[in-house]
Amino acid sequence: MPDTQDLNIRNGLEAALRICEAPLGRSLIDVGAGTTDHGVLFRQFYAEAFSNDLLEREDPFHITGDILTTDLGRKFDVVYASNILEHQKNVGHFLERLIDLCADDGHLVVIVPHQHLHKLLFGHLTSWTVGILVYNLVMAGIDCSEARLCRGRHEISIIVRNRKTEQIGDIARSAAVGLHWEADDLKKYFPFDFFQGCTADMDSIGWPESYKLACKAPMKIHTMGDDIVDIKPGVPFEIPQAKAKEPWWYKAS
C-alpha cells in the first residue's frame, strides 16, 4: 500500500470529493485557490487541473491574476470556486465571469459558508443560504433545476451544469423587475418549490452523505473544525451533513 497523503483542504471538501468521485471532464480551474492542497487532489482525477489567485507560484498550472480581468484564453469543463463568492463586492458580475469561463454543458461548482446574519466577519460582504445561492445563479442565467446541493456542517455547496435559462424580459438585469410574474416564470429553473416566502434554508438535494474515491493512495485530509477525513482507495466513507430547521414563520404554501 502506498504511503498516506496528508492534505490540508480546509474548505470546499464535500464538493471537491464529489467532483473527484465522478470526474466531470478533463479540465478544471480552482478560482481563488489559496494555499491549501485542493490541487493535489484534483490532479489525481483531472488531466488539466489549474489554480488561480493573486499569488505568484512556480507552477505551470497556476494562473496569477484577478479572475475578473485576467484573460485566460480558454474555457474549462469544471469551474470550482470555494469560499470566494462571499468576498465579492459584485456577486452577479462575479458569477457571470465564472459562467463565461465554463465550457458549454460544463459544470459550475460554488461553495459558500453558512449564513451569519447577526455577525460581521472580516471580508464577508454577503451571507448565504441554500436557497439564496440557487436564486443568485438563476438570476445569473443558469438553469438550476437539476442542481445538486449539499447543506454541509460548515458550508453550502452546489454542482450545476452550465445550461442557460431563457431570457425573461429584464429579469436577468434586476431581480426587482416584474415581481408579479417572476415566480411563475422562474420556478422551473429551481430544484425545489419556489414561491414567495418559501424557506431559503433547506436540506441537501441530490447529495448523499457517502463517497468513494478511486485514489491512488490513502489520504488523510485535514478540514474545517479540525476534522480529519481518512480515505482509502475504493472504500466508501461518509461525511455527515447538517439538517435545516424551518423558521417559525415558514409555511409550505
Image (cartoon, rainbow, N blue to C red):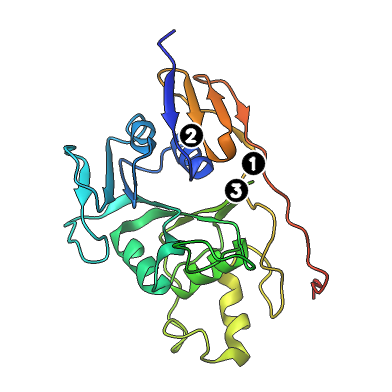
In space, the residues marked 2 and 1 are separated at their CA atoms by 12 Å
Q: Residue at x 48, y 40 (%)?
A: 10
What element does badge 1 sit on? loop
Q: Residue at x 73, y 51 (%)?
A: 243
Q: Residue at x 71, y 69 (%)?
A: 199
Sooner in the amino-acid sequence: mark 3 or mark 2: 2
Residue 96 lies left or right of residue 128; in this view the side is left
Q: Amino acid at mark 3?
A: His
Residue named by callout 1: 208
Question: What is the residue that sits farthest to the top in this orientation?
Answer: 1
Q: Amino acid at mark 2?
A: Glu
Q: Residues within 10 Å of mark 2 (few under 14, many from 20)?
A: some
The mark closer to the camera, 3 or 1, is 3
| Circles 3 and 1: CB atoms closer than 8 Å | no
What element does badge 2 sit on? helix
Horizontal and vertical percent position of residue 171: 47, 85
Q: Quadrant of residue 230?
A: top right
Reply above or below: 231 against 126. above
Reply above or below: 12 against 203. above
Residue named by callout 2: 21
What element does badge 3 sit on? loop
In space, the residues marked 3 and 1 are separated at their CA atoms by 16 Å
The mark closer to the camera, 3 or 2, is 3
Q: Amino acid at mark 1?
A: Pro
Reply above or below: 181 against 225. below
Q: Residues within 10 Å of mark 3 (few under 14, many from 20)?
A: some
Residue named by callout 3: 154
Sooner in the amino-acid sequence: mark 2 or mark 1: 2
- From the image, which quarter does the N terminus lie in? top left
Instruction: Give the numbered dot on residue 140.
Output: none
